[in-house]
Amino acid sequence: MRLEYPANVRIVRVPCTGKVDVMLMLRAFQKGADGVYCVGCLEGTCHYNAGNLRCRERVEHVQSMLDEMGMEKERVRMYNLSSGEGPTFAAYAKEMTAYIKEVGPSPLGTAQNKDE
């Protein structure tokens, strides 16, 4: 089965979402991403114990940072799926892309482009 999701979605594979740290998410914005979302195992089923819970905490931390900067905190999200839910992954990609189109480009990416 071939999944269809928006072409502007860039996938960064990690062994566990527990490896996704705050700096990685912020760096994505710095490099021009308008939104970031993490997709991890269902809660309670992480192969690395609590990696997905650590990622959720980090996503919430980045959300609070964006909120403090006056940006939409929903530009960063966390989803939990099992590995067999490919169509749901594609649906989340479409949902996130639609949200980003609605709120517009990230001010962080726009500010960086002005500096170059």
Image (cartoon, rainbow, N blue to C red):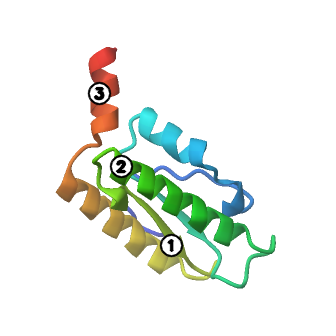
Q: Give coordinates of residue 1: x percent, y percent.
A: 53, 75
Find residue 103 and report its horizontal and vertical position in percent.
Answer: 20, 54
* Above or below, 80 relative to 107: below
One can see residue 63 in this view: yes
Q: Nearer the viewer, mark 2 or mark 3?
A: 2
**Residue drawn at (58%, 67%) of the image:** 56
| Residue at the image position 34 percent from the left and 25 percent from the top | 112
Above or below residue 84? Residue 65 is above
Quickly name the residue at label 3: 111
Alpha carbons under labels 2 and 1: distance apart: 23 Å
Front disc: 2 or 1: 2
Element under disc 2: helix
User: Which element carries disc 3, helix, strand or loop?
Assistant: helix
Q: How many marks?
A: 3
- Label 3, label 1: how many angstroms apart (C-alpha)? 28 Å
Residue denoted by label 1: 79
Q: What residue is disc 2 on? A: 68
Task: Say what amino acid the circle numbered 2 marks.
Answer: Glu
Q: Give the residue type at disc 3.
A: Ala
Question: Of the residues under marks 3 and 1, which one precedes in the sequence?
Answer: 1
Q: Residue 51: x and y, percent?
A: 72, 67
Residue 49 sits in quarter: bottom right
**Dividing the picture into quarters, in which one does residue 93 lie?**
bottom left
Q: Which mark is residue 103?
A: none
* Mark 2 closeness class: few <14, some 14–19, many ≥20 residues within 10 Å: few
Residue positioned 74% across, 76% down in the render = 46
Furthest residue toward front? 68
Q: CA distance from mark 2 to mark 3?
A: 17 Å
